[in-house]
């Protein structure tokens, strides 16, 4: 639980709106603009000629721009399966419910909590948009039944980093993924701080 001081009306969920407008909306737009740029710049991975132009080196040996289709749930798990298109929306819906419950219970309060919610919503909505939209935009899916287009949906990953010290190529990700990771760190840190302060208060005579 965040320990930011937010007495009285500051704890009201209406205070979340500035974060949604100032953080979630701009980052969501950035997420979608960069993904549509990638889709327009690179051929689909399976298309003829895609291998010849499959990446742009930004920092040679360290950072590239690529086009990766992630149809799985996380880190490509379930890629190409029939169950992933069903599981992903369910996971997103579950996340929305948990966030709503957390807001109602005032688990997310203060600047840290609201920033975490704003980032989480950016990530969830950004990747969910991909799932619902990108498959229908593929040339081979034009005129296909709705279910087939949804099955062809994918998350656009394009940030490709290599960790030179251990020579490890990190799985490609996007702006939405980054927002979710930062939100998770914020929640973990704020939870640790809250627990520490609660112990300190309990120890006082």
Image: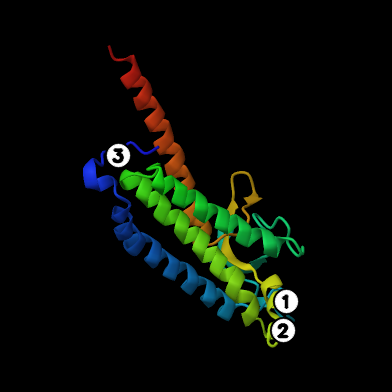
Q: Is residue 19 left or right of residue 162?
A: left
Tell which of 65 and 134 is nearer to you. Answer: 134
Q: Residue at x 54, y 69 (%)?
A: 129
Residue 18: percent from left, percent from top: 29, 59
In the image, farthest residue toward the left: 8
Q: Residue at x 43, y 70 (%)?
A: 29
Pointer 3 local density, CA inside 10 Å: few below 14, some 14–19, many at least 20: some
Tell me the CA gap for discs 1 and 3.
47 Å
Tell me the CA gap for discs 1 and 2.
6 Å
Q: Residue at x 68, y 58 (%)?
A: 76
Residue 95: percent from left, percent from top: 53, 53
Residue 8, visible in the rendered structure: yes
Identify the residue under disc 3: 4
CB contact under 8 Å: marks 1 and 2: yes
Identify the residue under disc 2: 144
In the image, farthest residue toward the bottom: 143
- Mark number, residue 148: 1
Residue 158: percent from left, percent from top: 57, 66
Q: Secondary structure at mark 2?
A: loop
């Amino acid at each position: 639980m965040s320990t930011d001081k937010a007495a009285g009306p500051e704890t009201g969920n209406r205070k979340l709106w500035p974060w949604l407008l100032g953080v979630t909306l701009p980052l969501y737009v950035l997420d979608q603009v960069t993904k549509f740029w990638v889709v327009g710049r690179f051929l689909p991975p399976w298309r003829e000629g895609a291998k010849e132009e499959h990446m742009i080196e930004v920092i040679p040996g360290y950072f590239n721009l690529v086009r990766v289709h992630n149809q799985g749930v996380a880190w490509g798990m379930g890629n190409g399966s029939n169950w992933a298109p069903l599981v992903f929306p369910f996971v997103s819906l579950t996340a929305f419910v948990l966030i709503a419950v957390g807001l109602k219970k005032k688990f997310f309060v203060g600047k840290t909590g609201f920033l975490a919610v704003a980032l989480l919503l950016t990530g969830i909505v950004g990747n969910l948009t991909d799932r619902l939209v990108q498959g229908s935009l593929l040339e081979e899916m034009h005129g296909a039944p709705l279910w087939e287009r949804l099955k062809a949906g994918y998350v656009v990953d394009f940030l490709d980093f290599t960790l030179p010290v251990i020579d490890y190529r990190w799985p490609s990700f996007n702006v939405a993924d980054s927002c979710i990771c930062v939100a998770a760190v914020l929640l973990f840190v704020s939870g640790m701080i809250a627990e520490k302060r609660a112990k300190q208060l309990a120890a006082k005579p």
